[in-house]
Structure formats: C-alpha cells, structure tokens
Amino acid sequence: MAPRTRAQLAEKMAARDVPADVALEVLDRFEEVGLVDDRAFADGWVRSRSVGRGRRALAQELRRKGVDDDTAEQALEVVDHDTQLEAARDLVERKLRSVRGLERAVAERRLFGMLARRGFPTDVVLRVVREALEQQA
C-alpha cells in the first residue's frame, strides 16, 4: 500500500462506517508506532513530484492530501527558486520541439500555459520562456 496521510486514512475509515472514536484511536496508535507520519509523507511527495512541478502546485497537492500548511511548508523548503528554474527549463526544452515553426506569440502562450498549470511562479515562467525562445531564434 502506498503511504497515506492521517486525513486520507480518516476519510477511508469514515467511508467504511468505522465509528469516529474507534477511527481516532486507531489513527493515534498508527502515529505512535510510526505507521502514519504526515511529515515523512510530505517529504517523500515533494521529493518524487518536484521534478515537473512548481512549489505552488506541490503545496496544493499536499493540501488536497490532508497535510497541514506548516508541515507542507517544511517539506517545500527543498524547492527553492533555483530548483524551480532548472525544472522549468527542462520542461520548456522538451516542449520546444512541438512549438517550432509556430508564431512567437503562439509559442509563448503555449509555453506560459504549460508552466503556469504546473504551478511555477510567474517570474520563473516569464524568464525561462523568453530565454528559450530567444535562444531558438
């Protein structure tokens, strides 16, 4: 079974009609023995998903998984501005092949959209796309 957050397990137990007091007791015990660790989950999630995602998208994914904001912020410390720049450059480099021959405005729009959907900050998106298109010209 893949690692799960405490919130995900609580949701599954509720869906199976496990009484709330029993679920709480089980989840507390799981945390005591280390079977449920939201911090470790968040660290692993960020490590495995940071290659093609920006910090904002990762934070949103962790929130959806039930990780609290403080824990998510601690896990996201490894995703700094330089890491995001490098990841964005890699993505744009791969995508450039499919936008060759298009008008510059169309290529910009497609590349901007791709990076924005993946949660990269605006300054990173603008810088990386413009650098790539200038090098291509």
Image: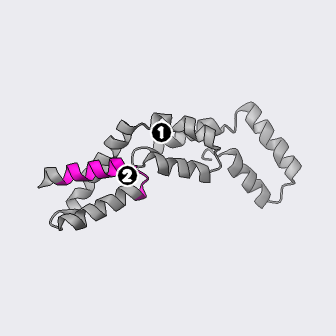
Quadrant where the image shows the C terminus: bottom left
**Residue at x 16%, y 52% (from the top left corner):** 134
**Residue at x 75%, y 51% (from the top left corner):** 10
Mark 1 belongs to which amino acid?
A: Arg
**Residue at x 66%, y 37% (from the top left corner):** 37
The number of numbered discs placed on residues in the rendered structure image is: 2
Q: Are marks 1 and 2 in contact (CB under 8 Å)?
A: no
Report whether 54 appears left or right of 71. left
| Region rendered in magenta | 117-133
For label 2, the crowd category at 10 Å Cα-Cα, with few meaning under 14, some 14 to 19 and many 20 or more, is few
Report whether 113 appears left or right of 66. left
The answer to whether residue 114 is magenta is no
Secondary structure under tag 2 reads helix
Looking at the picture, how far across and down is residue 67, in whole percent? 63, 45
Mark seen at residue 65: none
Mark seen at residue 47: 1
The colour style of the image is one colour
Callout in the foreground (1, 2)? 2
Looking at the picture, how far across and down is residue 41, in whole percent? 59, 40
Looking at the picture, how far across and down is residue 36, in whole percent? 69, 39
Mark 2 belongs to which amino acid?
A: Thr
Secondary structure under tag 1 reads helix
Report whether 66 appears left or right of 59. right
Report whether 61 appears left or right of 120. right
Q: Is residue 28 above or below residue 90?
A: above
**Residue at x 39%, y 57% (from the top left corner):** 116
Identify the residue position indicated by label 2 in the image. Answer: 122
Residue 48 vs residue 68, the one in the foreground: 68
Res 32 quadrant in image: top right
Residue 25 vs residue 110, the one in the foreground: 110
Q: Main secondary structure of the magenta part?
A: helix
